[in-house]
Image: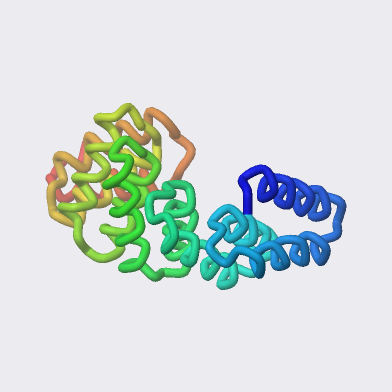
């Protein structure tokens, strides 16, 4: 199927979906897929519409098939990794984030997310590497500093944790958990003031 024909079908499906006719959108895409089983764009659109319709496993199935056809699709890798992460399938999420970062090492959101997965798998050194890499690339968000601080705490690196908690607080002083964790790290170091 030509790229122009594929684009037309996806656009028609999108119009149908946006006009509250999801059934028609799926019919259009499934018919097109029957004519071209290896059409990654149709598979991706089906994945997207399934995701929007809360059919998460069907979305993953479509995206997995698309990645077999073209394993270098960073947006699809990210979507699939994020779903696996949300479903506590940390090893699969780690694999997908790592594949994505091998293609695009500057994807700072994926670095942060992979750091979170590493932390869930108790691989704190790896998590710290990811968070620090995200910071070096300019992704200086509250979440990255906070995640980094927690990882330092897990490794009993309380001095480093304190600095990261302070940075997180400077970006978002309205998160009570930071104060508790910050205070715990200070207490461990005997800084009661």
- Among the 4 quarters of the image, the one containing residue 42: bottom right
Residue 129 shown left or right of residue 19 in the figure? left
Residue at 69 percent across and 48 percent down: it is 5
Residue 3 shown left or right of residue 23 in the figure? left
Q: How far across and how far down the image is residue 113, in percent?
A: 37, 50
Q: How far across and how far down the image is residue 87, in percent?
A: 47, 69
Residue at 29 percent across and 54 percent down: it is 98
The front one of 192 and 96 is: 96
| Furthest residue in direction front, as rendered | 2
- Among the 4 quarters of the image, the one containing residue 93: bottom left
Say above or below: 16 vs 132: below
Residue 126 visible from this viewpoint? yes
The front one of 87 and 180 is: 87
- Image quadrant containing the N terminus: bottom right
Q: How far across and how far down the image is residue 49, in percent?
A: 68, 59
- Image quadrant containing the C terminus: top left
Residue 93 shown left or right of residue 64 in the figure? left
């Amino acid at each position: 199927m030509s790229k122009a024909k594929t684009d037309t079908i996806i656009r028609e499906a999108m119009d149908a979906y946006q006009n509250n006719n999801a059934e028609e959108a799926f019919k259009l895409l499934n018919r097109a897929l029957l004519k071209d089983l290896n059409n990654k764009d149709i598979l991706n659109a089906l994945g997207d519409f399934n995701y929007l319709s809360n059919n998460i496993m069907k979305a993953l199935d479509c995206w997995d098939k698309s990645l077999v056809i073209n394993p270098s699709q960073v947006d699809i890798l990210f979507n699939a990794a994020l779903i696996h992460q949300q479903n506590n399938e940390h090893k699969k999420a780690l694999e997908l984030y790592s594949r994505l970062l091998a293609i695009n090492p500057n994807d700072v959101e994926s670095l942060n997310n992979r750091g979170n997965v590493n932390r869930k798998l108790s691989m704190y050194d790896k998590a710290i590497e990811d968070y620090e890499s995200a910071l070096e690339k300019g992704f200086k968000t509250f979440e990255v500093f906070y995640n980094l601080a927690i990882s330092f705490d897990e490794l009993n690196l309380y001095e480093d944790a304190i600095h990261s908690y302070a940075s997180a607080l400077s970006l978002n002083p309205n998160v009570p958990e930071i104060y508790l964790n910050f205070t715990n790290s200070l207490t461990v170091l005997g800084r009661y003031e």
